[in-house]
C-alpha cells in the first residue's frame, strides 16, 4: 500500500493536537495472483491531555475490490480510540477500543468486529525494547454462511511478546521479533 497525507498541528484551547489525513491505494497478491485492490482513506486526531496521557482517535476506510471473489468486495471501516500513558520515560501503556465493519457485497461475508487491546512497552539500556500485548475481539457476521446455513460468530484471543534493538538497524529500520499465541473460536468448526 502507498499513501500521501499531511500532519496538521492545531490548537484546542491551550492544548496542541495533531490532525493527520491520508489518501492512498492498496493491493494484495496471493500466490502471485491479484487478490484485491482499492482506495485507502484515513483520518487521525492525536490530542495530548497531560504530560503523560494522550488520546488518539482513528477513522479508516478501505475499499476491497476482489477480482475473482466479487461477493467479498466492499468497504471496510475501522474506528478506534487509543489512550496512551507514559508511566515513565521508558515505560508506556496503550489501551485501545475499536470497532471494524465490513460491508461485503454478500451479507454472509459482511461482519461487525469490536475489539479491546492492552499493550505495555519497556525500553532498556543498550537500545533494547520489549513489548507485551493482549487482545480480545468478537466477529459477528450478518447472514448465514452459504455452506453451513448458520450465521458465523467468532471470538479471538491474542497474546504477543516482542523484542527489538534500535541500535541494530539498516537504513533506520530495526527488525522486530514477535512471538505470539492466538485462539480463534468459531461456532463453525471449519473457522476455529
Image (spheres, rainbow, N blue to C red):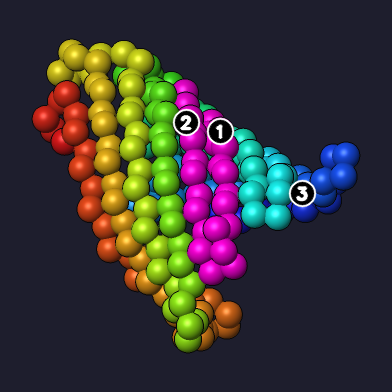
Crowding at mark 1 (Cα within 10 Å: few <14, some 14-19, many 20+): some
Q: Residue 165: percent from the left, percent from the top?
A: 45, 80
Report the quarter where the C terminus lies.
top left
In this view, the mark in front (2 or 3): 3
Where disc 3 sits, the SS reads: strand
Front one among 93 and 64:
93
In the image, is 145 to the left or to the right of 52? left
Between the C-alphas of marks 1 and 2, the distance is 6 Å
Crowding at mark 3 (Cα within 10 Å: few <14, some 14-19, many 20+): some
Report the span colored magenta: 77-103
Judge whether residue 136 is colored magenta. Answer: no
**Which residue is tagged 1?**
79
* Residue name at image x 18 percent, y 13 percent: 149
Q: Residue 177: percent from the left, percent from the top?
A: 35, 70
Q: Quadrant of residue 120?
A: bottom left
Q: Mark 3 or mark 1: which comes first in sequence?
A: 3
Report the quarter where the N terminus lies.
bottom right
Say whether marks 1 and 2 touch (CB < 8 Å): yes
Magenta stretch prevailing secondary structure:
strand
Q: Residue 126: percent from the left, percent from the top?
A: 47, 86
Q: Quadrant of residue 183?
A: top left
**Which residue is tagged 3?**
18
Q: Mark 1 or mark 2: which comes first in sequence?
A: 1
**Which residue is tagged 2?**
100
Say whether marks 2 and 3 touch (CB < 8 Å): no
Where disc 1 sits, the SS reads: strand
Between the C-alphas of marks 3 and 1, the distance is 17 Å
In the image, is 29 to the left or to the right of 39? left
Amino acid at each position: 500500500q502507498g499513501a500521501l497525507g499531511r500532519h496538521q498541528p492545531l490548537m484546542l484551547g491551550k492544548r496542541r493536537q495533531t490532525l493527520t489525513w491520508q489518501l492512498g491505494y492498496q493491493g494484495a497478491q496471493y500466490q502471485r495472483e491479484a487478490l484485491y485492490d482499492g482506495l485507502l482513506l484515513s483520518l487521525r486526531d492525536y490530542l495530548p491531555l497531560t504530560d503523560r496521557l494522550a488520546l488518539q482517535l482513528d477513522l479508516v476506510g478501505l475499499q476491497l475490490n476482489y477480482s475473482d471473489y466479487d461477493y467479498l468486495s466492499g468497504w471496510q471501516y475501522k474506528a478506534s480510540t487509543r489512550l496512551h500513558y507514559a508511566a515513565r520515560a521508558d515505560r508506556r501503556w496503550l489501551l485501545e477500543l475499536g470497532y471494524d465493519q465490513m460491508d461485503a457485497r454478500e451479507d454472509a461475508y459482511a461482519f461487525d468486529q469490536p475489539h479491546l487491546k492492552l499493550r505495555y512497552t519497556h525500553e532498556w539500556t543498550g537500545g533494547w525494547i520489549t513489548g507485551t500485548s493482549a487482545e480480545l475481539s468478537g466477529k459477528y457476521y450478518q447472514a448465514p454462511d452459504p455452506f453451513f446455513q448458520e450465521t458465523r460468530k467468532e471470538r479471538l484471543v491474542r497474546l504477543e511478546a516482542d523484542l527489538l534493538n534500535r541500535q541494530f538497524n539498516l537504513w533506520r529500520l530495526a527488525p522486530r521479533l514477535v512471538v505470539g499465541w492466538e485462539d480463534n473460536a468459531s461456532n463453525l468448526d471449519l473457522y476455529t
